[in-house]
Amino acid sequence: MKQSDTTPARTFTHQKDEMLNAATFTVLLNRVKRPRYVYDLMGGVGNFADLIKEKWPKVPLTVGELDAACAGLIHERVPSADIHIGDCREIALRKDCGVVCDFNLLTLKRLRDGGLFRDIFDGVLGEGKTLWYIFSDSALGKLHLNYPKYGMRTPSVKEYISQYRKTLRKYKRYRIAECFKAHARVLFFLVERKEG
């Protein structure tokens, strides 16, 4: 039998990955300072918005999502969230906020190439308003195939993270505080504002 999106084995793998993503995100959320505001710029179906509200029920949460159907699901899960339907680059960040981006397609190459991903990073880290930024990168599953495109000598996760550190140096007020491999395909980064 051919495996398809409805095959139970595929569904189980997806659910397992989602659980690992949520567990990794929770670990990172427990390491950061309570912000005055939180922005989930790529809300999806509200998985992370749900965990944010569970941790900080009284902190204002704004969720950005392009898809109106997904925005409806987020509203059902987290009715107190302010939902922005449209381009997340239109959301104005407030001082001392926390920002979350669970990217589907971010890779170091796409970040370096500019466009949407660079715009988001510049918006989140460019002015120094953000206390912390948690984001995901989905390149790991293909890293062994694409590592030369990233200017790396070997397809190692360690070198990939090292290249991220170099790329993010342009945001002088911030540092990569933590990096976790959630599962075989996804890295999570915690970027924090430097003290002083």
Image (tube, rainbow, N blue to C red):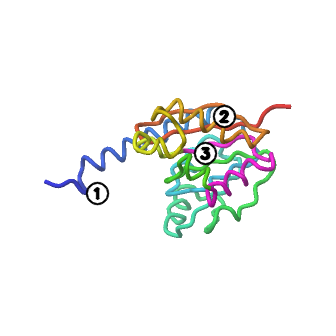
**x and y percent of residue 101 in the render?**
59, 50
The residue beneath circle 1 is 5
Between 29 and 151, the one nearer to me in the picture: 151
Q: Residue at x 70, y 45 (%)?
A: 98
User: Which residue appears farthest toward the left when viewing the image?
Assistant: 1
Q: Residue tagged by mark 3? A: 52
C-alpha distance separating marks 1 and 2: 36 Å
Tell us which disc is closer to us: 3 or 1: 1
Q: Residue 58's x, y, as percent?
A: 70, 47
Identity, as a three-letter code, of the amino acid under mark 2: Ile
Give the image location of residue 112, x and y in percent: 62, 50
Which comes before the other along the chain, label 1 or label 2?
Answer: 1
Closest to the camera, between mark 1 and mark 2, is 2
Q: Position of residue 19 (x, y in %)?
A: 43, 41
**Residue depicted at 67% across the width and 48% down the height:** 99
Can you say whether 46 is above or below 16 in the image? below
Instruction: Say whether residue 117 is magenta.
Output: yes
Check disc 2 and report the residue beneath it: 176
Identify the mark nearer the N-term, 3 or 1: 1
Q: Badge 1: how crowded within 10 Å, few (<14), some, or many (20+)?
A: few
- The span shown in magenta is 114-136
What amino acid does circle 3 point to?
Answer: Ile
